[in-house]
Amino acid sequence: MSNDFENYNFEDIGVEYDTEDSINEATEEVENKLWVKLEKVGKKISFAKDLIALFHYLVDNSVSWHRKTIVAGALIYFVVPFDAIPDLAPLFGYMDDLGVITATLKFLGSELIPYYDS
């Protein structure tokens, strides 16, 4: 059985979001992978609408890149093929993803509300 973890290029994650350019690269990474992953698992997870709102926030030009850094990190954590609990684990595979997304939602608070209608 092939392991996505072994074949993943960690440099593609863009873990240092210290410039606007690095956020733009992270946004491209998310945009390339988010819709594919949501198509596969969107009906299995209860927080798909939150992921979409976070994506709309991430691509909004009126949001400063400083605010986007935490969102980029959370969405990249969701889309990469490895994380603390493998997504293939029945029932528990998305618990860590949910924790990261929930923390991000709590951090943004009401600032994110308009992005649910986008």
Image (cartoon, rainbow, N blue to C red):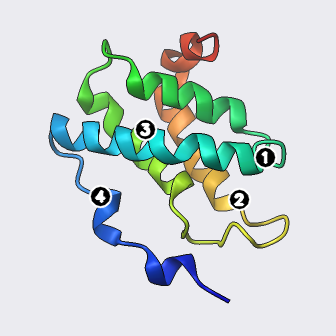
Residue 74 x, y percent position in the rendering:
48, 47
Give the CA separation, mark 1 to mark 2: 8 Å
Dividing the picture into quarters, in which one does residue 22 lie?
Answer: top left
From this view, report whether residue 90 is shown above or below residue 21. Answer: below
Q: Nearer the viewer, residue 21 or 114?
A: 21
In the structure shown, which secondary structural element does the residue marked by tag 1 occupy?
A: loop
Residue occupied by mark 4: 15
Residue 21 x, y percent position in the rendering:
17, 38
Residue 93 x, y percent position in the rendering:
73, 66
The mark that comes first in sequence, 1 or 4, is 4
Crowdedness near tag 2: few (<14), some (14–19) or many (≥20) residues, C-alpha within 10 Å: many
Crowdedness near tag 4: few (<14), some (14–19) or many (≥20) residues, C-alpha within 10 Å: some
Q: Which mark is residue 94?
A: 2
| Left or right: 30 as drawn, with respect to 3 | left
Crowdedness near tag 1: few (<14), some (14–19) or many (≥20) residues, C-alpha within 10 Å: few
The mark that comes first in sequence, 1 or 2, is 1
| Left or right: 7 as drawn, with respect to 18 | right
Marks 1 and 2 in Cβ contact (< 8 Å): yes
Residue occupied by mark 1: 45
Give the CA separation, mark 2 to mark 4: 21 Å
